[in-house]
Image (spheres, grey):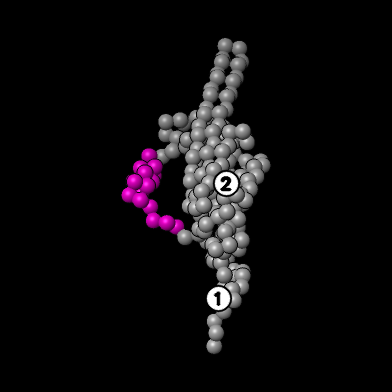
Amino acid sequence: MATQHSPKNPQENIVPLRPLSVMEEMEHMFENFIPHGWMRPFRMDQALSAETIPQVDIIDQDDTILVKAALPGVNKKDLEVSCTDHTVTIRSKTRTESKEEKGEYYRHEICSGSYLRTVTLPATVNENKIKAKFKDGLLEVTLPKLESAKRHSIKIED
């Protein structure tokens, strides 16, 4: 008889890292070699842009997987979340406009950016029961696990 297992050790909820492909590793090395924003020394806003990589947390719970993403400066209408049974894709875009006019001085800057990230999930999820909330720049996606993907304890007989 299988029983539910609740983690006693906080490290049980840590999602293992998957090895990087050669292309991902090269891209990571290139990004570390050339500093972000070297072409744009004057940042208008802390809004999401091509040089900003929002943090994504994946929390493996007993019955669900919770994906949280910090997306400052993103409007709900510019956010798209899609999934498969093993991945979640977050796509967003931003556009900010700044104007300043003082006498002979005039400044008008437009900054836009986009973001796409796909994360691999640690278990198979039920695509029909996924829920997403977005408030104050924080996206939370709750993905219920399929019964077969849930963690079960196995009783050891004597």
Q: Which residue sits furthest top?
A: 104
Disc 1 crowd rating (10 Å Cα; few below 14, some 14-19, many 20+) is few
Q: Nearer the viewer, residue 4 or 43?
A: 4
Q: Which residue sits furthest right?
A: 135
Q: Which label was assigned to residue 154?
A: 1
Whole-percent x, y for residue 156 in the image: 54, 81
Q: Is residue 3 magenta?
A: no
Q: Report the residue marked by disc 2.
A: 69
Q: Is residue 23 magenta?
A: yes
Total residue callouts: 2
| Residue at 61% across, 73% down | 3
Whole-percent x, y for residue 19 in the image: 39, 56
| Residue at 57% across, 79% down | 155
Whole-percent x, y for residue 63 in the image: 61, 61
Position of the C terminus by quadrant: bottom right
| Span colored in magenta | 17-34
Whole-percent x, y for residue 72 in the image: 59, 39
Tell me: residue 76, above or below residue 85: above
| Residue at 52% across, 27% down | 111
